[in-house]
Amino acid sequence: MNAAIWHEIGIGVGETLYMSVIATLLSYVIGLPLGIILAATDKHGLKPNVIVNKGLGVIVNILRSIPFLILFVTLIPLTRVLVGTTIGAPATIVALVFAASPFVARLTETSFKEVDSGVIEAALACGASTPKILIKVVIPEALPSLISNAAIAFVTVIGYSAMAGFCGGGGLGAIAINYGYYRGNTDIMIITVVIIVAIVQIFQESGLKIAKLRDRRKKHKNK
């Protein structure tokens, strides 16, 4: 392969990381509050509310069930309004946020439900308010799980970004499709796949190590 191809691959790596990081952060801006609401309004939560929990749960489940490529195409009119284009990294970020936010909401809900109910009951017995319990008790206790789930969310977003290559989404997915698949260049296809796998492994393992480190610190502090 010539230098021009490697240059394109380098740009593709940058675009993939840019899309994935920005989309994951924006997904947490939306999905984290939704996950808190889902966990808090559960029948065993701090503020049980069947109507809110079921209604929000249905919306989240519907969005999660839509295949990414179909969602990407469906959002084209909205994407054009928001970013002024339907191709490239900016357009892909819009679809990634819509696809990942409900996934993040469920991950967050799961993390909060893993918190020991005894700790929450102790805080309630001390007269702590709901906001204070969330900030001082639930989030710190759930932090290791939240960190590991954030790594999972990021990996999922990278997978979505690769699929966006079929729709002109940019990044390594677009290179794999345009140079590898359409032009029959197997070497480029293999290289892009290896790079994506390497990125996934790095972020996945980093997230798990940070979560374990945080968990060990918490256990040591409790002792």
Image: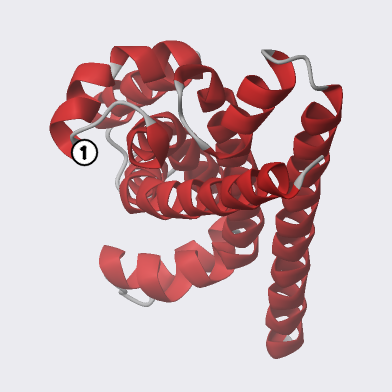
Q: Helix or strand or loop: what does disc 1 sit on? A: helix
Nearest the eye: 170 or 127: 170
Q: Is residue 54 visible?
A: yes
Nearest the eye: 5 or 82: 5
Q: Quadrant of residue 8?
A: top right
Name the spot of residue 168 as percent of width and height, x first. 45, 24
**Residue at (60, 40) in percent of width and height:** 158
Name the spot of residue 208 as percent of width and height, x first. 75, 61
Give the residue type at disc 1.
Answer: Val
Establish if 112 lies above or below 93.
Answer: below
**Residue at (61, 22) in percent of width and height:** 178
Nearest the eye: 168 or 154: 168
Establish if 141 lies above or below 5.
Answer: below
Label 1 crowd bin: few (<14), some (14–19), many (20+), radius 10 Å: few
**Apparent side of residue 62 relative to residue 121 in the rendered image (left or right):** left
**Apparent side of residue 17 relative to residue 136 in the rendered image (left or right):** right
Name the spot of residue 167 as percent of width and height, x first. 46, 18
**Residue at (19, 24) in percent of width and height:** 78
Q: How is the image coloured?
A: secondary structure
Q: What is the number of callouts on the image?
A: 1
**Apparent side of residue 206 relative to residue 161 in the rendered image (left or right):** right
Q: Is residue 125 visible?
A: no
> Considering the image in quadrants, where does the N terminus appear?
top right
Establish if 188 lies above or below 35.
Answer: above
**Apparent side of residue 82 relative to residue 110 in the rendered image (left or right):** left
> Considering the image in quadrants, where does the C terminus appear?
bottom right
The residue that disc 1 covers is 83
Name the spot of residue 127 as percent of width and height, x first. 30, 74
Establish if 42 lies above or below 130.
Answer: above
